[in-house]
Image (tube, rainbow, N blue to C red):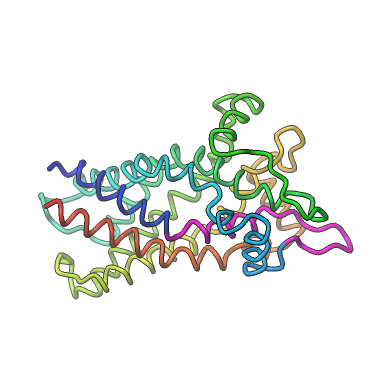
Amino acid sequence: MGDVAKDLAAGTVGGAAQLIVGHPFDTIKVKLQSQPAPLPGQTLKYAGAMDAVRQTVAAEGPRGLYKGMGAPLATVAAFNAVLFSVRGQMEALLRSQPGAPLTVNQQIVCGAGAGVAVSVLACPTELIKCRLQAQSALADSSSASVAVKYGGPMDVARHVLRSEGGVRGLFKGLVPTMAREVPGNAAMFGVYEALKQFFAGGQDTSKLGRGSLIVAGGLAGASFWVSVYPTDVVKSVIQVDDYKNPKFSGSIDAFRKIMASEGVKGLYKGFGPAMARSVPANAACFLAYEVTKSSLG
């Protein structure tokens, strides 16, 4: 079985595992990121992560935590095929000879290259996911009901294509998406390789047990968010911004306005759920990837 096909199959399985484990955390993260700043005398819609969970479950049931999952689930095969296949091809280019292990710095380069490639797929998927996840957070906080603007992923796509500039509208937020994916994946794959080599006591990591892979994958995922979280906040607010009456003219404007109204704290809204998600979700992803790839020979 070719290396590209192995990376495609293993990446798909890893991505599915990551999505199933991590999506509820991601929903809460986006709700916290996208809730508008309160008017004078008012309070935030969500007091924190647990409050967001309680309100979401009360208003929408447990299914509300999985809102927006259809879009990434539908594209998980393509996304992870690109991510792991591009990384695999860059590994092949950087190897001194077939099968030779790569250094941590080389894995950082591979991760950055994979980040460039997946940004094109991630942007429209993230836009659809964020619109669905955030619509209740953006509803009038005085209303007890959930304001439903979109019926599902395809409804979001149709609305954007029809009313927000066609295909170009689906790529709203591409710049911050790329600014997240490139350094984020560089950090994640670099940390993953560094930890594997540390646990293995050298560059040969082929004999590592599942426990070591789980720890390395979980901490690698955490490093992704630590390195790029403010960029993710900017991406989210831009992608859920109103098309006809936008609050932000671009990434820099969004950054400045968040800093002006909420300070540095505003750039870390939802950081707790993101970190709580990243460790188990990426542990599941990397373990599923490694086990699947190993089983394919």
On screen, 131 above or below 198?
above
Q: Is residue 255 above or below residue 79?
A: below
Looking at the image, the residue that sits furthest to the right is 41
Whether the magenta-drawn stretch holds residue 35 is answered as yes
Residue 6 screen position, x and y as percent: 20, 46
Q: How many marks?
A: 0
Instruction: Describe residue 38's horizontal placement relative to residue 134 as left or right.
Output: right
Whether 126 is drawn above or below 294: the answer is above
Residue 184 on image: x %, y %: 44, 55
Q: Residue at x 22, y 55 (%)?
A: 292
Q: Residue at x 85, y 57 (%)?
A: 39
Q: Nearer the viewer, residue 202 or 1?
A: 1
Residue 126 painted magenta: no
Q: Is residue 144 left or right of residue 168?
A: right
Residue at the spot 33% in from the left edge and 61% down from the top edge: 190
Which residues lie in the magenta part?
Answer: 21-45
* Residue 28 in picture, x, y percent from top left: 59, 59
Q: Quadrant of residue 203?
A: bottom left
Where is residue 239? Give x, y as percent.
62, 42
* Residue under the point 68% across and 57% down: 59
Q: Quadrant of residue 132?
A: top right
Relative height, residue 175 to residue 269 (above, below): above
Q: Quadrant of the N terminus?
A: top left
